[in-house]
Image: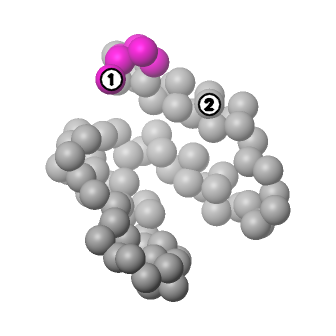
Amino acid sequence: MGFQLPWKRTKVREEVGKIKETTDHYEFIRQCEKDYKLPHKGFDPFLDHLHTLKYYKKPDYDLLDKIISNLVKNIGAKMEDP
């Protein structure tokens, strides 16, 4: 999409972890909407679910797939679209 993750340029593993922990992922998605017209509101439930997980907890992939499918449908795209 033309943007880079905030930790992309960092090579030190510990620094990458710190950046990931301190990044406001909701704000990151909102910035993507401003810059790339990515509909952020649909991603909030996705991030909400991820934030409930503990390290060894398996994500609810059916839920995440449903969220992504709804986002794609709401923007008038198809899953096969680039």
Q: Amino acid at mark 1?
A: Pro
Q: Which residue is mark 1?
A: 82
Looking at the rendered structure, which numbered label has been put on residue 22? none
Q: Which residue is mark 2?
A: 65
Instruction: Classify 10 Å Cα crowding around label 1: few (below 14), some (14-19), many (20 and above).
Output: few
Looking at the rendered structure, the secondary structure element under dot 1 is loop
Where residue 68 appears, as percent x and y from the top left, is 52, 31
At 75% from the left and 42% from the top, the residue drawn is 60
Asked whether residue 74 is drawn in magenta, I would say: no
At 81% from the left and 62% from the top, the residue drawn is 56
- Picture mark count: 2
At 43% from the left and 82% from the top, the residue drawn is 12
Specify start and end residues of the magenta stretch as a single range. Answer: 77-82
Q: Amino acid at mark 2?
A: Asp
Q: Work out which residue is located at the far front of the displayed protein and give it.
A: 11
Looking at the rendered structure, the secondary structure element under dot 2 is helix
Question: Magenta residues: mostly which secondary structure?
Answer: loop
